[in-house]
């Protein structure tokens, strides 16, 4: 078992660090929030007084932070200059592709291996150890990170070179936003046309309209498998996080010169929904605006 530094013990990181501790690793945890640190201690982690203290002597250094700026400042202040030369740096946060590539290059210049490893799956998957990790980095970096990621997830996939994990994540969520909005519109129209929505679901979910948004995560209560719609649109993937990912996708598209008309529209729709005070509502709750 290894010594692991875990920085960022929020909704996602708290459960992930707990799973590493449960697997027998010596987890040195740090978060700016005292409550988060306390929860990590109760879950079997050893709280550190600073990020740098957590990093000292760790074989793997895992970050699960809000955005690229937080990861960049943590790397600059607490990881570079403190990490052991043999350590693997694993950033599981969802951040922009450009920052992910830059941090990996900065690490390499200091002789450190780094991968970007964002996740698919929400808080329940983080707690249950069933996340999917999409990993960007070298073959050697992937091999070094894999055993740690496997303790926290059900799938660990090497997506390509540095930044590829973040690129997969944002393209995936761009498609997800589009299928959710299209599914909401189709269901709203079906209702206005007088259809029984269960009958419509039974047909469309086996026909060419099928998708994860319809089949697994149907945005109408009482139709399809249980989903956040059946819980008042609570406890799923917050609209504000979908907006964050869409904005990252829009920035990546602008940099790559890719046309994303539907993504632009989806970003506007989720921005309006969030501005109207629904940022914490599950992203399928946008059906209520139709
Ligand atoms: P969160 O806000 O619950 O947790 C972030 C934690 O980081 C907080 O506890 C905060 O105190 C801590 N933090 C911030 N700056 C810090 C610093 N400099 N040093 C130490 N700790 C610091 O966020 P979350 O929901 O856990 O999300 C974390 C990441 O995972 C984000 O990048 C998010 O986009 C991504 N993500 C979230 C979900 C989800 O469903 N919540 C799903 C997939 C991916």
Image (cartoon, rainbow, N blue to C red):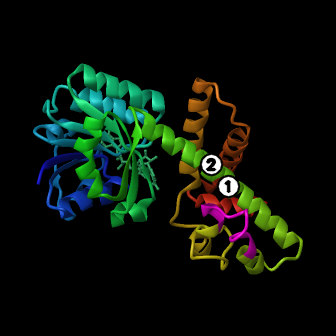
Q: Position of residue 55 (x, y in %)?
A: 17, 39
Q: Is residue 233 left or right of residue 124?
A: right
Q: Marks 2 and 1: in contact by CB < 8 Å? A: yes
Q: Is residue 261 left or right of residue 20?
A: right
> As drawn, which residue projects farthest toward the top?
109
Which span is picked out in magenta? 203-214
Q: Which residue is at a point 61% across and 45% down the rendered structure image?
A: 174
Binning the other alpha carbons within 10 Å of mark 2 as few (below 14), some (14 to 19) or many (20 upward) gives: few
Q: Position of residue 223 (x, y in %)?
A: 67, 77
Mark 1 — residue? 179
Residue 34 in view here: no
Q: Is residue 273 left or right of residue 157?
A: right
Q: Is residue 63 above or below residue 156?
A: above
Which disc number belongs to residue 138?
none
> As drawn, which residue projects farthest toward the right?
193
* Label 2 secondary element: helix
Q: Is residue 187 magenta?
A: no
Q: If the image is split into quadrants, where does the N terminus sit? A: bottom left
Q: Position of residue 201 (x, y in %)?
A: 72, 74
Residue 76 in view here: yes
Binning the other alpha carbons within 10 Å of mark 1 as few (below 14), some (14 to 19) or many (20 upward) gives: some
Which disc number belongs to residue 175?
2
Q: If the image is split into quadrants, where does the C terminus sit? A: bottom right
Q: Is residue 213 magenta?
A: yes
Asked whether mark 2 lies closer than 8 Å to ligand 1, one says: no
């Amino acid at each position: 078992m290894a010594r692991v530094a875990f920085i960022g013990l929020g909704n996602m990181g708290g459960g992930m660090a707990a799973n590493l501790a449960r697997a027998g690793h010596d987890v040195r945890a740090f978060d700016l929030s005292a409550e988060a640190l306390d929860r990590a201690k109760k879950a079997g982690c050893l709280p550190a007084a600073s990020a740098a203290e957590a990093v000292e002597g760790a074989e793997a250094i895992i970050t699960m932070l809000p955005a690229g700026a937080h990861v960049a400042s943590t790397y600059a202040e607490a990881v570079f200059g403190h990490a052991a030369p043999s350590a693997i740096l694993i950033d599981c946060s969802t951040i922009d592709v450009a920052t992910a590539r830059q941090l990996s290059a900065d690490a390499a210049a200091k002789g450190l291996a780094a991968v970007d490893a964002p996740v698919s799956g929400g808080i329940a998957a983080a707690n249950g150890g069933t996340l999917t990790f999409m990993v960007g980095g070298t073959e050697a970096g992937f091999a070094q990170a894999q055993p740690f990621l496997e303790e926290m997830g059900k799938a660990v996939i090497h997506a390509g070179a540095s930044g590829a994990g973040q690129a997969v994540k944002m393209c995936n969520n761009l498609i997800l936003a589009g299928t959710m909005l299209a599914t909401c519109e189709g269901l709203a129209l079906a209702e206005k046309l007088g259809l029984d929505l269960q009958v419509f679901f039974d047909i469309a979910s086996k026909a060419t309209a099928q998708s994860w948004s319809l089949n697994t995560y149907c945005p109408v209560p009482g139709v399809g498998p249980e989903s956040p719609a059946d819980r008042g649109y609570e406890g799923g993937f917050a609209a504000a996080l979908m907006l964050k990912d869409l904005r990252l996708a829009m920035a990546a598209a602008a940099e790559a010169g890719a046309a994303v008309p539907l993504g632009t529209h989806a970003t506007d729709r989720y921005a309006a929904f969030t501005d109207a005070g629904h940022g914490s509502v599950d992203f399928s709750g946008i059906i209520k605006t139709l």
